[in-house]
Image (tube, coloured by chain):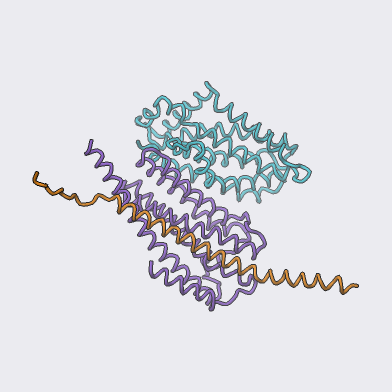
Chain colours: A purple, B orange, C cyan
Amino acid sequence: MGVGVAALFVMHWMVAFWVPTEASMGVVQRIFYIHVPAAWTTFLAFGISAVASAAYLWLRDERADAAAAAAAEGGLVFGAVMLTSGPLWARIAWGTYWEWEPRLTLTLLLWFTYLGYFLVRSSVADRRKGRRLAAVVAVAGSLNIPLIHVSVNWFRSLHPGAVVIKPDGPTLHPDMLTTLLTSAAGFACLFLGLLCFRYRAGLAAEGAGRAETDGEGAAQ
Amino acid sequence: MAQLVVAPSALFAQAEAGQGAVRPYIHVYVAYGIAWLLVLMWAWRISRMTKRAAANAPGPQREVPDSGR
Amino acid sequence: MNGFRATWLFAVKDLRTELRSGGRLAAMGAFVVLAAFLFAVSLDRTQVPGRSAAAGLLWLVVLFATTTGAGRAFDAEEEDGAFRHVLASPAPRGAVFVGKTAANWVLAAIVAVLAFFAVTAFLGVRSTGPLAWHGAVLLPGTIGLAVVGTFFGRVSSHSGLRDALLPVLSFPLLAPMVFFGSTASARVFLGRPWSEIAGPARLLWAFALGSLAAGAVLFRHATDE
């Protein structure tokens, strides 16, 4: 996590003093250096949550469930970063806060899917069943992720075409690409560090809860 | 007469252009501010969870010393 | 028990129950007509021509009706605990899911036809494209809606939030389907050539069949006791 924070400080310096201003969009384009890494981190988080949820369904291991919940929470946080920075950029760049185009729209929907994940977890009386059903929601919701990337290529839209992940390589100015990758590394390390802490906290809370129940049972 | 009409509207246009130059910076600062706020809120939540779990964790059992009465 | 036979048996059982009691279909049908009426009444047609809104409203009406109906697919069996016997039967869980989805799809298809005529009547719209093309778009659409509605109907039935939770779970997954479906339907209404409609229609089929396969695999995790 320390590496992530350090990389993000370097990124801020680069954005403030080093990276050139984009010609057509001007200074507001600098939101790109948090918007895109936040998007990648969101998909990473939701992907980890989906894989961990699938592992939980298969192995019924509480550790997989703790990892899934921790990653889903991180996905909601970085997803919120992406969904707030995007409109702030779009308003100046394209004159509208929200454009109903597929990638942004489907990312918003994915965010609500994982909100549903936590609603299911917390609203089912039987905790084990709640976790299992939430895992099912996470796996089902992950089907949306490839659809998001495909939609960018399918529909011509306001959202910039995939300037980095393209078959013939990225098309950004080299300094912009360096800044973007520094930011992406920072976001990823920060997320993974917080994920580890959140995972341990979740397991510890689960252990404390189980001990309390066992204690009550013994007292009876 | 024409100058009396044109001059204030030119000033107004200049003021608007100034605001237009500042607005992108505001959007950039707000975007970065929101990003850090959200991440720090998550970090704070994790630290609260950790403290609560540590407080509720079963500690080592201590024997109460026999007073000898 | 053979999977196909089990699927058929569950689908027929649900449809027979529905035909006897008729509650769900009647409620969905009434909902569709009333919703179409209210949408038409709330639109200012001097500003929004009926033809511009018809496809979107059609899909919204079918979405809401199917979600509401599919969410109740397990009610009758849950009430008296009969569903446990269903799960204890030798029928594969996937077959139970596909059978129930098939029954829900029949209801969704009936409701979609009713919705089409209600929306076009209340908005005063005539389709330039052939009705068969509307059918070709609504067929995979209603399958997808029935699949997702049935699956998350089962998931949300365990929750205290139940009816409020079902749209939160199902709408994010169904939104792309509604997008592609309303795009394709709008093009049929406008009399566009099939080459412009085939793309979204293919995506609808891919979504419908993909979600059916995924649902059949995941259903046992949603029903493990």
Which percent across, then down, holds residue A39? 50, 61
* Residue shown at 47% from the left, 67% from the top: A184
- The answer to which image quadrant residue C219 occupies is top left
Foreground pick, C90 / A3: A3
* Residue shown at 26% from the left, 45% from the top: A211
Which percent across, then down, holds residue C121? 72, 34
* Residue shown at 55% from the left, 72% from the top: A171
Foreground pick, A48 / A12: A12
Foreground pick, C137 / A189: A189
Image vertical order of residue A80 relative to residue A120, above or below = below
- The answer to which image quadrant residue C68 occupies is top right
Image vertical order of residue A168 relative to residue A99, above or below = below
Left/right placement of residue B66 relative to residue A1 reads: left
Which percent across, then down, holds residue C204? 56, 46
In which quadrant will I find the N terminus of chain A? bottom left
Counting the numbered discs, the total is 0
* Residue shown at 11% from the left, 47% from the top: B67
